[in-house]
Image (spheres, rainbow, N blue to C red):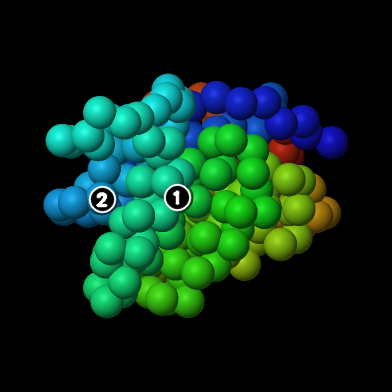
Amino acid sequence: MKKIRSSLCHVISGAALALAANVSLGGEVLFLNGGYAQMCSSAAKQVDHPEMMAITGSRLDVDPLKICTLAITEDANARHIVSGSYNNRGVIYFSRSNYAAAISDFQEAIRMQPDLGVVYVNLGYTYAAQQRWAEAIAPLSRGIELGADDLPKAYYNRGIAYEETGRATEAYRDYLKASELAPEWEAPRSELTRFSVRRR
């Protein structure tokens, strides 16, 4: 069984977490313009440095989760912004190992904007972080189908989920695809060395 250890997560070029040995997880942040939504994006981008943020014009430090909650409340009528803030708050919850809250936020973001591939991938990563391998496969697959950013990691993590559920052929194909998409990345190449392929 693969164990979990923390490490950097992927944001839309930023932060997240990783599973053990050769597993890589990433939560991708959506960058939104203006107000609390922008601050929420910035906070989620920096989840590897969880610290209080100063709200402009205020002497008070505010927890990043509160900033994201303010963004969700402030932009209640702009579904694409609110769904992004739910995603970004989910990334922060994920970085704090509060997986139940992260899952809830990712699911709400999907409900509001069902074509946002990155959120499906983040949901899949969260299930994988809990070793809920079978549950990780569907959201990772949907995120891949929607063309989420950082496809090599999505394929790689789905490969792990497939392998952990006894689906070796699918795992091999996903490790191979991850390796093709990111030829400089050692982790999928290393996984491929454990497989032998017999032609029929």
Residue 164 place in picture, x, y as percent: 78, 48
**Left or right: where 118 falls relative to 189:** left
The answer to whether the residue labelled 2 contacts the one labelled 1, judged by CB atoms less than 8 Å apart, is no
Q: Is residue 80 visible?
A: no
**Left or right: where 75 falls relative to 120:** left
At 58% from the left and 35% from the top, the residue drawn is 96
At 47% from the left and 76% from the top, the residue drawn is 111
**Left or right: where 32 falls relative to 119:** left
Residue 62 place in picture, x, y as percent: 37, 36
Q: Which mark is residue 161?
A: none
Q: Is the residue 153 above or below the residue 87 in the image?
A: above
> Which three-letter amino acid code belongs to the residue tagged 1?
Arg
Q: What distance separates the C-alpha of mark 2 from that of mark 1? A: 12 Å
Circle 2 residue: 36
Front residue of 73/136: it is: 73
Residue 152, picture quadrant: top left
In terms of sequence position, does the residue under pointer 2 or pointer 1 come before the other? Answer: 2
Label 1 CA crowd tier, 10 Å (few <14, some 14–19, many 20+): many
Circle 1 residue: 89
**Left or right: where 7 falls relative to 62:** right
Q: Is residue 30 visible?
A: yes
Tag in front: 2 or 1: 2
Q: Quadrant of the C terminus?
A: bottom right
Residue 170 place in picture, x, y as percent: 66, 57
SS label for mark 2: helix
